[in-house]
């Protein structure tokens, strides 16, 4: 092995000068250092990795995993004949609400979401969600989801809960 390396080294030394050898080694080192700086399309890889991490129902408003439901506590009106921000027929929206701040997974922005109970009918009993991210203790009632928010409605009978985007968090 030593003889082979010695012969190769002598052959290179006979054909090149020290300066040209050092110049070539420098080019190789510089070229290797530039490779990480080359433009690479990482957007597709990052987007597919982010999509793989998202829960399945992140865009399904009948699922507890829906991004807007980060602070909802109750039955979803989308499963009870209403919409994500509309009460079902026969139910009355409460004039009071609680708020939460939810991050949209697609654009990464935080949205202020108002949660409102629909009142006047018996509890729906379908799609119960108890996501209480960012919930505050009862002394900050406007951020507490454990109350029945039918204050001021014709009746205190709870039916389901809605979620409506109020604005973008600044």
Image (cartoon, rainbow, N blue to C red):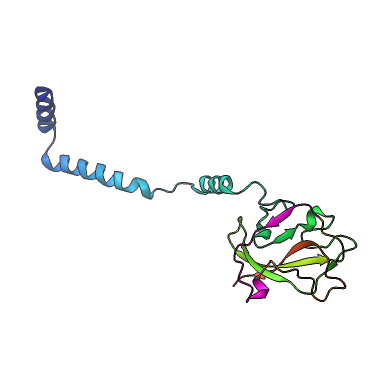
Of the pair 52 and 95, the residue shown nearer to us: 95
159 is higher (above) or lower (below) than 10: below
The image quadrant that residue 152 belongs to is bottom right
Name the residue located 89 percent from the left edge and 61 percent from the top edge: 89
Of the pair 156 and 44, the residue shown nearer to us: 156
Q: Position of residue 165 (x, y in %)?
A: 71, 66
* Residue 83 lies in the magenta-colored region: no
Of the pair 32 and 127, the residue shown nearer to us: 127
73 is higher (above) or lower (below) than 156: above
Q: Quadrant of the N terminus?
A: top left
Q: Quadrant of the C terminus?
A: bottom right
Q: Position of residue 15 (x, y in %)?
A: 13, 31
Residue 126 in the figure: left or right of residue 51: right
The image quadrant that residue 99 belongs to is bottom right
Residue 168 in the figure: left or right of residue 76: left
| Farthest-out residue, right | 90
Bounds of the magenta segment: 125-143
* Residue 126 lies in the magenta-colored region: yes
14 is higher (above) or lower (below) than 117: above
Q: How many marks?
A: 0
Q: Position of residue 94 (x, y in %)?
A: 80, 71
Q: Position of residue 88 (x, y in %)?
A: 86, 60
Residue 109 in the figure: left or right of residue 86: left
Q: Chief secondary structure of the magenta span? A: loop
Of the pair 139 and 101, the residue shown nearer to us: 139
């Amino acid at each position: 092995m030593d003889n082979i390396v010695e012969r190769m080294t002598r052959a290179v030394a006979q054909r090149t000068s020290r300066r040209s050898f050092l110049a070539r080694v420098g080019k190789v080192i510089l070229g290797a250092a530039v490779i990480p700086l080359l433009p690479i399309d990482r957007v597709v890889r990052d987007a597919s990795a982010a999509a793989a991490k998202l829960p399945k129902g992140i865009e399904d408003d009948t699922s507890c995993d829906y991004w807007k439901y980060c602070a909802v506590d109750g039955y979803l009106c989308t499963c009870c004949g209403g919409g994500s921000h509309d009460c079902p027929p026969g139910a009355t929206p409460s004039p009071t609400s609680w708020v939460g701040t939810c991050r949209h997974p697609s654009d990464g922005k935080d949205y202020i979401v108002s949660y409102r109970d629909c009142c006047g009918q018996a509890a729906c009993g379908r799609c119960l969600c108890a996501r209480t991210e960012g919930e505050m203790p009862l002394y900050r009632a406007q951020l507490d989801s454990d109350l029945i928010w039918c204050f001021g409605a014709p009746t205190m009978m709870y039916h389901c809960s809605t979620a409506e985007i109020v604005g973008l968090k600044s």
